[in-house]
Image: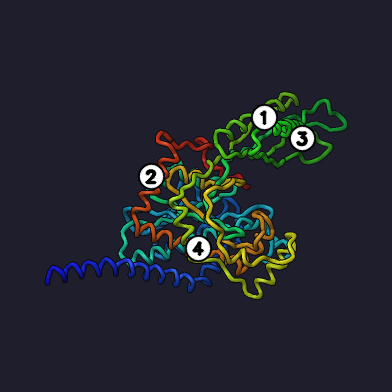
Amino acid sequence: MGRIKIVTTLLLLVLIVPVTAQKNKQSILKNLDGQTEKYGAIALEIWNMAEMGYLEEKSSALLQTTLGDAGFTVKTGVAEIPTAFVAEYGSGSPVIAILGEFDALPGLSQQAIPEKKSAGGEAGHACGHHLFGTASTAAAIAVKQWMASTKQKGTIRFYGCPAEEGGGAKVYMARAGLFDDVDVALHWHPGSRNAASAAAALANISAKFRFRGISAHAAGAPQMGRSSLDGVEAMNMMVNMMREHIPQEARIHYVITDGGKAPNVVPDFAEVYYYARHNRRDVVRDIFNRIVKAGEGAALGTGTSMDYELVNGVHELLPNLTLQKLVHGNLTAIGGMEYDQEEKAFADKIAITLGQTEVDVAMAKEVMPYREQARAYGSTDVGDVSFVVPTVGFSTATWVPGTPAHSWQAVAAGGTSIGTKGMMIAAKTLTATAIDLYENPELIKNAKLEFEERRGADFVYKPLLGDRPPALDYRK
């Protein structure tokens, strides 16, 4: 009789523990709903600051203070980057990382209204990183609260990652070994749909090419001058001809950042800023080397000199389907958002500027079906993290459906309750996923096995930007 009682008690414990853990998890997620106003205010403050890459002093400090006040130990200025930081709670393994960003884009200042109108600043959060960093902060704090209440062993760690837009802070952070002890890294991104399918991203190398010539009076003594702008234009012409002879999946973009100051002065300095992208980093290296050759030829042909600064280089994204299925399940369970009357009116006006008659509200409410194949268009320094540790991400509808990233419409919606609602969906999805990983070590084990298989047994991580120091002045 005593043996039966003991066995029955053990069975009850086995049944009760998961139920209790699930109740704790649901309680933490419900508590996040009650924090919407708090985190919405933080996101809006960062949105108003709109600080560009490596210049995000106030934005970084705000998130550091928020995490520090919540009981995290904060280490600042990591990887030789003043605005980068790491905040953690707990000790030992497993170590779950949550990535957060907070940089804005130049030239996209915009008010939170459904018509194009500058807010009077230099930059705008056209990629929603004010929401990204804040949701990730909210999730890290929620997970910490769950760990404290359940006495869960392990470490929750938040990575404050500046300058994703071309500055590549995560590359320097990975190079510095800051992810070496991490078991799983979680991230998300603002978007116009709720989706957690396997993602992709292009490898990318960027550089500023600087030509130097000889100044002279453009009319009175042109023979005495050598135009640096001629060098830039000759380089651009050769690269544009090269487009026919590179893989069709590749992308090359450039802007002339300095072309001289006056038409009647032969410019002795000019600069052009290039990006090269492809879904394989070895192909990107080859394309970039050909771009360099075009620059050298242009300098030779125009009697100028050329040097270049490698600004950034990021890996493509390495998927992890073990983690992706978990995240998709959590996002689906949490679900999308319902627009209220005011949000619907705002969204309809934005939709008209996008060539639509009215917004398709179902796209904000629904979660996209799970897919394991994805095409890449953009790039992210999360790619480097994904080659160091098993990594997974997703997106939520923080913008009006159909809105492209890097647009004034994205900035506008990101400054409204639409952005805040999508942000809190992301915070809950990150929180739920982290809790699942702590509770199920087998998930982490399987994710690591898949990671090693995809990465390859002989893989050695080497950043595409080499050993250059962080490009802290690339936005100045």
Residue type highlighted by circle 1: Met
Q: Residue furthest left?
A: 1
Q: Earlier in the sequence, mark 1 or mark 2?
A: 1
Q: Earlier in the sequence, mark 3 or mark 4?
A: 3
Q: Which residue is mark 3?
A: 267
Q: Which residue is mark 1?
A: 306
Which part of the image, by quadrant, shows the N terminus? bottom left
For marks 3 and 2, give the one nearer the viewer.
2
Residue type highlighted by circle 3: Pro
Disc 2 crowd, CA 10 A, few/some/many (<14, 14-19, 20+): some
Q: Which residue is mark 2?
A: 449
Residue 332: numbered disc: 4
User: CA–CA distance between discs 4 and 1?
Assistant: 53 Å
Image-quadrant location for residue 115: bottom right
Disc 1 crowd, CA 10 A, few/some/many (<14, 14-19, 20+): many
For marks 3 and 1, give the one nearer the viewer.
1
Residue type highlighted by circle 2: Leu
Secondary structure, mark 3, is: loop
For marks 3 and 4, give the one nearer the viewer.
4
Secondary structure, mark 2, is: helix
Image-quadrant location for residue 121: bottom right
Disc 4 crowd, CA 10 A, few/some/many (<14, 14-19, 20+): some
Q: Residue at x 52, y 45 (%)?
A: 317
Q: Residue at x 46, y 69 (%)?
A: 32
Q: Earlier in the sequence, mark 3 or mark 2?
A: 3
For marks 1 and 2, give the one nearer the viewer.
2
